[in-house]
Image (tube, rainbow, N blue to C red):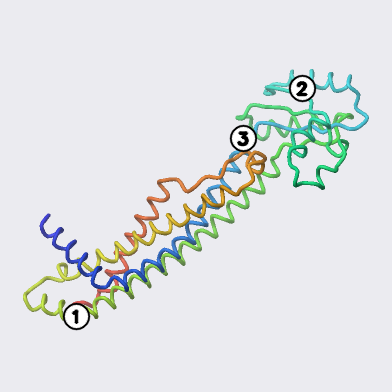
Amino acid sequence: MISGSIGTTMRARRGMLREWRLHALSVFSLAVAFACLGAALLVVTNLQAIQERWAHAGRASIYLKDSASQLDIDAFKAALMRVPGVTNVRYVSSGQARAEFGVQEVSNHAELAALPVEAFPASIEVDVRPDMPDAELSAIVAKIRQLPAVDDVETYQAWTERLSRLVKGGVGAAAVLAVVVFAAVLAVVGSTIRLALQRRRTEVEVLRLVGATDAFVKGPFVLEGSAQGATGAAFAIALLGALFLIVRGRLDGELAALIGVEPTFLPWHVAALLVGLGALLGAAAAAVGLRKLVTV
C-alpha cells in the first residue's frame, strides 16, 4: 500500500515537471480565484470583529445642553453612579473632547484644527457592564433622555445594527463568490487534467496494455489536480498576506484607535480550510475529468 502510494506520487511528480507550463497556468488561474474569495472573507472577518467590539462597548455618551450648570452635572453624575450596572461616570468638557479627538496632534487636518472648542459638545461618558442586556440599557437610556438637561444619548446600538446588516450582506456575497470560485476550480482543473491526459495518451495506452487498473492509471492525475488546487489556494493566501501587510502599514493608527479594533488577517484555521478545500476540489475536478478514461 505504501509502495503504491509512493509510486503514484512519483509518477504525479514526473508528470507535473514534464508539463510544468500547463500546471503553472492552472495554478495561477486558481490563485486569482481563491484570492478573490479570500479577500471577501478577510473583509467579513474584520467587519465581524468591529461589530463584536461595538456590540460589547459597554458605554454610553450623554450629551448635555448648553444651559446645564456645573451643579446639574455633579448631581447628574452622582445619580448615574447609583444606577445598577453603571461602573464608571466621567464628565468630558468641550476642550477635553477636542483633545481626545486628536485634532491638536494631527497637522494635516487643517479644517478640523480650525474648529472652535464649542464645536465639540460636552458629554458624560458612562461605562456599563459589558454583559448588560440591550433591553436593560435601552430602558436606562429612555429614562435619561427624559431629563431636562440632556440633549441626546448615544449608545452605539444603531451602529451595531448597521454593522450587523453589513456583515450579513458580506457573508451572502462571500457565499455567492464561493460558488463562483468552486465552479472555476472545477472547470480549470478539469480542463488542465484532460489536456494533460491527451498529451500522455501513449503512456496511458501502454499502461492499459500491460494490465494496469483504472485506479492505477488515474491516481497520478487525481493527485496532480489536488496539488494544483492546494498550491493555488496557498499562493492566494500568501498574496493576500503580503497585500494585507502593505495596507496595514499605511493605515492611519488613529482610525484603528477610533474604531477600537486592529485589522487582523484570516484566522489560521480559515487559511488551512481554504488550502484543504482547494486540494479537495482539485482532486474532485480531476476525477470528474477522467470519468471517461476507460474509453480512451
Per the model, the C-alpha gap separating discs 3 and 2 is 20 Å
* Relative to 92, residue 3 above or below: below
Which residue is at the far front? 107
Label 2 sits on a secondary structure element that is helix
Rate crowding at label 2 as few (under 14), some (14 to 19) or many (20 or more) other CA atoms within 10 Å: some
Image quarter of the C terminus: bottom left
Provide the residue designation for mark 2: 80
Q: Which residue is drawn at 77% across and 46% down?
A: 109
Residue 85 x, y percent position in the rendering? 67, 23
Question: Which numbered dot is residue 201?
Answer: 1
- In depth, the one of 71 and 84 nearer the eye is 71
Q: Where is residue 161 in the image (x, y as percent from the top left)?
A: 66, 46
Graded by Cα atoms within 10 Å as few (under 14), some (14 to 19) or many (20 or more), the crowding at tag 1 reads few
Counting residues from the N terminus, which is met first, the one under dot 1 or under dot 3? Answer: 3
Which one is in front in this view, the residue at disc 1 or the one at disc 3?
Answer: 1
Of residues 191 and 292, the one nearer the viewer is: 191
On the rendered structure, is 56 left or right of 1?
right
Q: In this view, does 269 lie above or below 206?
A: above
Amino acid type for the residue under numbered disc 1: Arg
**Label 2 sits on what residue type?**
Leu
**Structural distance between the alpha carbons of marks 1 and 3:** 62 Å
Q: Residues within 10 Å of mark 3 (few under 14, many from 20)?
A: some
Question: For mark 3, what is the residue?
Answer: 56
